[in-house]
Image (cartoon, rainbow, N blue to C red):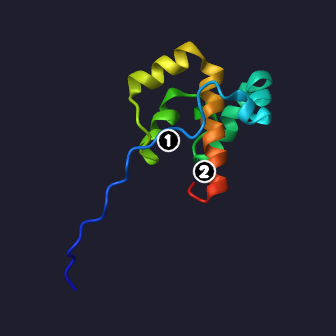
Amino acid sequence: MAVTNQPGRFQPSEFQSGLCSCCDDCSVCLCGTFCLPCLGCSIASDMDECCLCGTQLAIRSVYRTRYNIEGSLCNDFMAYWCCFCCTTCQLKRDIKLRKAQGIF
């Protein structure tokens, strides 16, 4: 059987939670505020990466690529540089939302 249609491309998307939307999930916000390494380890575990990678810039870029989220390495760097805690919390909130939707 011949293939007559090419698979469609994913449309670029955005993070499902804003960078400063900490009140969207207070448990993530509290964990990020009081135990950022624990939150990073949780993110790394979700992404099947080494626990030390959870708070790194690279994991955000990998996540953006995996889910076709708009942005660039430069944008990721600036977000981490301006508010490391908020950026890490945003990533965890997005993971939780995608899990709830069954698309993670």
In the shown orientation, is residue 37 left or right of residue 10?
right
Which quarter shows the N terminus?
bottom left
Of residues 75 and 24, the one nearer the viewer is: 24
Extreme-bottom residue of the structure? 1
Which residue position holds label 2?
98
What secondary structure is found at the residue carrying circle 2?
A: helix
Residue 28 position, x and y percent, is 74, 34
Q: Which mark is residue 34?
A: none
Please state which amino acid type lies under the numbered disc 1.
Answer: Tyr
Classify mark 1: residues with Cα within 10 Å, few (<14), some (14-19) or many (20+).
some
Please state which amino acid type lies under the numbered disc 2.
Answer: Arg
Of residues 57 and 27, the one nearer the viewer is: 27
Q: Earlier in the sequence, mark 2 or mark 1?
A: 1
Residue 96 position, x and y percent, is 67, 46
Relative to residue 86, is residue 65 depicted above or below?
A: below
Eye-nearest disc, 2 or 1: 2
Residue 73 position, x and y percent, is 40, 27
Q: Quadrant of residue 37?
A: top right
Extreme-top residue of the structure? 82
Which residue position holds label 1?
63
In the shown orientation, is residue 10 left or right of residue 102?
left
Of residues 56 and 6, the one nearer the viewer is: 6
| Residue shown at the point (60%, 50%) measured from the top left | 98
Asked if the residue at tag 1 contacts the one at tag 2, i.e. Cβ–Cβ closer than 8 Å, the answer is no
Relative to residue 90, is residue 80 depicted above or below?
A: above
